[in-house]
Image (spheres, coloured by chain):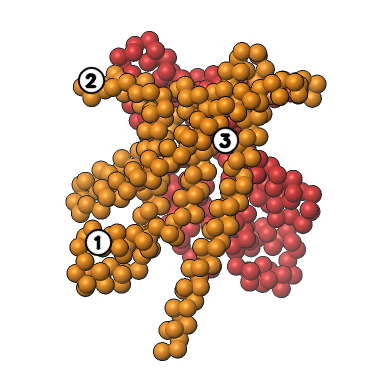
Chain colours: A orange, B red
Amino acid sequence: MENWSWDVFFDAFPIVLQGLGITIGLTLTCYIFSLVFGFVWIFLRRIPFKPLNWIVTWIMEFIRSTPPLVQLFFIYYAWPMVPGIGMTLSPFTSAVLGLGIHFSTYIGEVYRSGIDGVDKGQWEAARALNFSTGKKWTKIILPQAIPPTIPMLGNYLIIMFKEVPLASTIGVVGILHMANSYGSQYWTYLEPLTIVAILFLVLSYPSAILINKLERKMNRRFDKKEALKSSEGAMT
Amino acid sequence: MKGINITITVLIASAFFGYLFAFIAGLCRLSNNILLRKFTGFYVEIFRGTSLIVQLFWLYYAIPILFGIDLGSDWWAGVIAIALNYGAYMSEIVRGSILSVAKGQSEAATALNMSRFQRMRLVIFPQAVRMMLPEFGNYLIQMLKATSLVSLIGLHDILYYGDILRSSNLSQAPVVYLLVLVFYFILALPLIFLTRKMESISKKGVAS
């Protein structure tokens, strides 16, 4: 451990910390983008037209199984070169688009599992009451489909937080970028990178515990509901 | 596309070591030895709590400075980082599936006078592995995606060559990156089908 220097550690700490705001901001922006964009996938997949369905499924599969890093590069470096529709995007916007779209495919799957979990009788009841499509979704299906998925969505927030440093490669000045530029300036990578790792642990570990608790709470609530239902059935 | 061999070798090596770490850590967390349990728990939380890209840089830059150990090459740094990271994630799957094997199974094995080791090897493990398969397939695809990160520490993988091609001819960028994406997708396709196959295997005839 003779190469570890606390002086460098405390010197680098405030500099690396400056990037934290951008990292968190980027995480939240990406997250909100993918939450909203996730609905687009669901919507596309529910259009009752087989070929389109098939295409959308494979596009999702394509986005999910290729590296987000390459997608980021594509949006940042290649998009401006696309003839006709290309435009230059700032690193921040590219990161939001790239990571947001990548994760929206995962989030779309989460939504889908939530929607599949809604009891079939609920759909039938909505139809029997002659609800319009919009009303059916906003009043009946989504309020039941989304809450059970909240722990899973929370997990994706943490996963996203850990993926966001990728954006440093296209020049978003997050913590990793700060650490790397400090490292290249003074030729000491050890301390700034360790600070980054510590910051990640400090932020993501407690939130993981929190989400674990939430999940357990949710499970208990739904179990109770189930238990209630089965006991009612037994009584009648 | 010369980088494809690096991408594939990194994938295979990190998958191998990743599964190895996963089984070791997963089993260690179930051991009766408190010290061993706490230590592996610590490892899992560290690697799950921080970002892979940070670990990669840390291994690449910090380990040689800190301990004076040369990891041999960039290739090893990349493989070890990916394997340690995904090993930590997958160890949780190992642990979860072993725990979810029905309790009666281990009781039955005890009743048959099997030793602890026999019980694990002959009864619990074969059933648990079946449950792990689909998740392992998913993580294999994740690892494939993670291999693109090694280009950042200077390994000459697909993305690295793509980047070089782009910088030599800027207007070709969309084509180049699209090609890179397609390459990754082609690599992932067999994995996707494998995962689906594993899912159907694991659904068939598991004692629950």
Which numbered tag is attached to residue B51?
3
Amino acid type at mark 2: Pro
**B129 lies above or below B187:** below
Q: Which residue is mark 1?
A: A135
Q: Position of residue B207 (x, y in %)?
A: 54, 67
In screen coordinates, is A45 left or right of A8?
Answer: left
Upstream in the sequence, badge 1 or badge 2? Answer: 2
Identify the residue at image location x=70%, y=44%: B42
- Are discs 1 and 3 located on one and the same chain? no
Q: Which residue is mark 2?
A: A83
Mark 1 secondary-structure assignment: helix
Between B183 and A20, the residue placed more toward the observer is A20
> Which image quarter: residue B53?
top right
Identify the residue at image location x=21%, y=46%: A52
Amino acid type at mark 3: Ser
In screen coordinates, is A196 left or right of B1?
Answer: right
